[in-house]
Amino acid sequence: MRKALMILSIMVTAALFNTTVFASVNDDQVTSQKIKEADGTSGQNTNSGSGVKTGHIQDGAVTDAKITGPISASKLQKPANIIVVAKSGGDFSSIGSALDSINPSATNPYVIKVMPGIYVEKVTLKSFIHLQGSGADVTTIQSPCPSCNEGVVNIFGLSNLAVSDFTIYGGNSGYINSWGVYISASSPLINDLTIDSHMEGIRSDGTSSPVIRNNVIRSSRIAAIDLSGVPSGNSQGSITGNRILGNSGDGIRVAYASPTIVGNIITDSNTGIGTVYSSSEITGNTITNGSYEGISVGTGGVPIIRGNNIVHCGYWGIRVLNSSTAQIIQNIITNHSMLDIWVDSSSTANISFNIYDTVGMYDTVSDTPATGFYNVKSDGSPASAL
């Protein structure tokens, strides 16, 4: 009996002791380490700081049915399909046959990689494609009909499109009548091309807003780049970092469109840059040896001509005419045969902070409605009054 009472006393004391202990444990005293010790998992490999044992998620345990809610489309974007065009050993031996074989879309885009060689063909592109050569020095698309009124590379009503790393060659005809790249109602990226011997290197019309950058365009008969919108349209885009060399026509023509025209080098053209009905920003371009003028601003719009270097053109550095308005600011305009800046009597211009010199028998700036301040000659002395 005495022994039984002793055992009962010990059990009651133990019960009271345990109740006291657990009642005094605060929430922050229960740690993942103590839980692992309690269930015997101490020392097993776990994800750092998570308390979740890596061995407890089995292969196949996570299924589609257990995932709820939307998944970001950016995490599901499909990589572009890649096909190869080569004279031998590729998926196709011509660019046209590669294009005929595919139906690209936003969820199924393509990169067509073209290996070195000369591909004599007319190419009409599709949306959601990057047509990529192996470099302009080794990969050429050549016009099959230099005297035909057509583009070598044609882009009609397309989106999400790029063309890069080719030479686009018009051919050897004495009367070259093709376009290197013809763009209509599209906004492609035209990048790192050499475009040689065409009526126009790049022609863009309709409500297009192409990005034309880092190309070399030479030997164009009418214009290296011609971006012509429509009166009711809103064509924009950009013409940036191109080298336009040795054209019998103009460098850049813009009408009914207002692309940014930045950082181009234009030499040996008729007119370097000409605009009508345009409010383009024409900034940081270098224009030399133009047969007529460096920059011509025609009817309509308020173009901003800023920070350009315009030297040694046959007649004028900058000419503003036909009731147009322009801001001519911070340019270097020197060594032109007639006038560095000429504004006709129907036009107005703000001409400020420029460097220009008097050339020949004329004043540097004609006596027309123009305003401006702080213009100087190249020797630092004040330039002629406006």
Image (tube, rainbow, N blue to C red):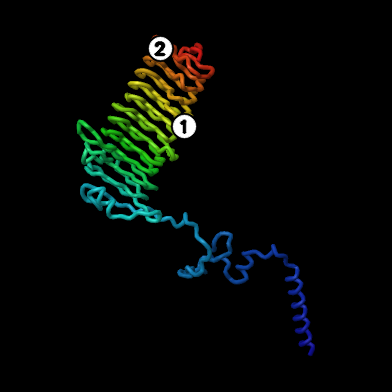
Rendered view: 28 above or below 275: below
- The answer to the question of whether label 2 and label 1 lie on touching residues, with beta carbons closer than 8 A, is no
Residue at 37 percent across and 55 percent down: it is: 108
Tell which tag, 2 or 1, sits nearer the viewer: 1
Figure check: 339 above or below 13: above
Circle 2 Cα neighbour tier, 10 Å, few/some/many (<14 / 14–19 / ≥20)? some
Report helix, strand or loop for mark 2: loop
Q: Amino acid at mark 1?
A: Ser
In primary-sequence order, the first of circles 2 and 1 is 1
What residue is pinned by disc 2?
359
Rendering quarter of residue 52: bottom right
Q: Is residue 289 visible?
A: no
Residue 14 placement: quadrant: bottom right
Question: On the rendered structure, is 170 left or right of 81?
Answer: left
Which percent across, then down, holds residue 19? 75, 74
Q: Which residue is mark 1?
A: 279
Q: Which quadrant would the N terminus be assigned to in this image?
A: bottom right
From this viewpoint, is residue 362 visible? yes
Q: Nearer the viewer, residue 4 or 308?
A: 308
**Figure quadrant of residue 234:** top left
Q: CA distance from mark 2 to mark 1?
A: 29 Å
Q: Which is nearer the eye, 176 or 104?
A: 176
Please, what secondary structure does the residue beneath circle 1 have?
loop
Counting from the top left corner in percent of width and height, residue 237 is at 42, 38
Taking the spot 44% from the left edge, 34% from the top edge, the residue there is 260
What residue is at 41 percent from the left and 41 percent from the top?
A: 207
Task: Inspect the image, locate mark 2, and give the three-letter code of the amino acid beneath it.
Answer: Val
User: In the figure, 37 relative to 280: above or below?
Assistant: below
Q: Residue 315: horizontal and vertical position, in percent? A: 36, 18
Residue 39 pos. (x, y %): 60, 72
Along the viewing direction, whichever of 57 and 309 lies nearer the viewer: 309
